[in-house]
Image: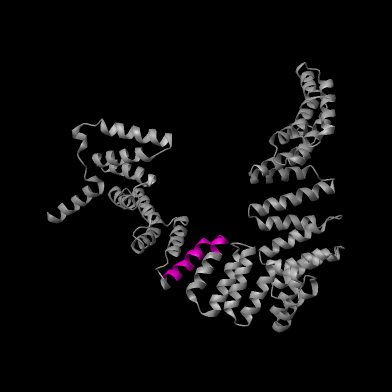
Amino acid sequence: MSLQLAEQFEANEQYEQALEEYKKLYASNPDDVGLLERLGHISLILDKTDDAAGYYYEILKRDVANTLAYDQLISIYENTDKYKYYVYRGNKNSIEGKLDFAINDFKKALTHAVDNEAQVVMTRMTLANLYRQVGQTMKAIDEFNLVLEYENLHEEIFLQLADIYMSEEVYTSAIDALNRAISKGFDTDRIHEALAAVYLKSGDAKSAIEHTKDELLKIQCMLEMGDIEEAYAKLNSLPEDYKANPRYFTLQAQYCYSSKDFDQALKYIDEYNKLQPNSPLTFQMRALVYDENGDEYNAHLNWGKYNMLRGNVDIAINEYLNAVQLNDKDVDVLFTLAELLIANNDKNHAVEYFEKIAKLEPNNKEALRKLAEFRESIGDYRMQVEYLERIYEIDTKDLKAMNELAKGYEKIKAKDKAIEVYTKYLELVRDPVDYQMAKARLDKLESFGAADAEESVGLIDKIMSFFNRSKMD
């Protein structure tokens, strides 16, 4: 039993013998995807399509993104089982991110699964999740509700439907879906905990506490119901291992917030952040504390960060703008605002804040670099060069700035200056590709005649000269 023997049989087109040898190897190496591919390939040669399909299915169990396996299964079932054909094609399109094509495939699969309830349920569940991924929430809900008409369901279906309703803040429908699960016999802890979470989210802490066995959630409900001291006593009586749970610190922070002990609340929020770094909840909690404490500036900053992490760029920008109105001296905040504006395709507005940074910190290379990039983008090469010259003055070994400065000098026809900077750049650069590119540009400049060495006034200067002459006339 050896791989060499199996490969020799295969090379000699002794496929039956090769298949048997590969099977022996596979028995000892059941997770070897390469062996499964060989078994599938030879099974197809021998026209053992059912066996081949089984091997390719085993590959997908080990490697869900294996394109070869999908392609072979699609080919195997194209003319024999349309349901499986469209399912595998849909799965492949889904893996490749072609979600609209995947949806069409599963809709076609559905037409071939009319008499098989398990296939119908699986296909509709897949469609629901695909619709959700492409943002078609109502279609996802429709698919889940159609699934609920069948028997032999799983509690996961009710939980997923409730989760969709929760994400849309349709709490009554989420509650209805979970209660329907209970009526169908799924009277489980998972369903009750999900109900508790929905009730609490909807503001009904009294109903939430009736469904949960989670001690931390019970304490949160008590805080929401106004039983502050009782909740605090219960929180402090919890076993020590609860202090490793991030929620423990959010509840301590909530108690301190309710007690107006804002400094302590912020300390607990910091402890939470150590366990859950950069969570939106951290910044939401801080923002609420600062709001209540009357610290507008830090409230705006934290609401801004919260909305950044949630992907609400417009709201984040507005929060940072409000913060900057209160204090326009914090360079980090100005940078964040400028970057948000760039992400929102508002470069003209962003450059105002890079200019503020450059005034506050004249040696801030990053701000100067951003300003140089902006000036280049609008064709103002003279100003681009001025900003790059400032960077070069700050750091004579900034290779990126040197390279851009030399190119900038070329654009404004300052040949001698370009040659000087390229020469210094070549003394420092170590990347062979960058070296050769710069050397080629330097050689080209040095080959120019005297007539080419005259420094142009540049496009912007020509335009300004034209307007000045017009005023004189």
Image quadrant assignment for residue 156: bottom right
Residue 369 image offset from top left, x and y in percent: 38, 52
> Does 228 sit left or right of 150 as displayed?
left
What type of secondary structure mainly makes up the magenta span? helix
Image quadrant assignment for residue 275: bottom right
**In the rendered image, is residue 413 in sight?**
no
Question: Residue at horizontal 80%, vertical 36%?
Answer: 81
> Does 236 sit left or right of 258 as displayed?
right
Question: Residue at horizontal 33%, vertical 34%?
Answer: 441
Q: Is residue 385 magenta?
A: no
Q: Front-most of 85 and 338?
A: 338
Q: Is residue 315 magenta?
A: yes
Residue 185 image offset from top left, x and y in percent: 87, 63
Question: Residue at horizontal 29%, vertical 51%?
Answer: 386
Rendered image coloring scheme = one colour
Residue 350 image offset from top left, x and y in percent: 40, 59
Residue 160 image offset from top left, x and y in percent: 74, 59
What is the magenta range?
307-324
Instruction: Find the residue positioned furthest to the front.
Output: 427
Image quadrant assignment for residue 413: top left
> Does 79 sit left or right of 401 as displayed?
right
Instruction: Find the residue positioned furthest to the top.
Output: 12
Q: Quadrant of the C terminus?
A: bottom left
**In the rendered image, is residue 265 in sight?**
yes
Q: Would you place residue 450 above or below residue 400 in this image?
A: above
Q: Would you place residue 87 above or below residue 258 in this image?
A: above
Q: Quadrant of the N terminus?
A: top right
Q: Front-most of 112 and 88?
A: 88
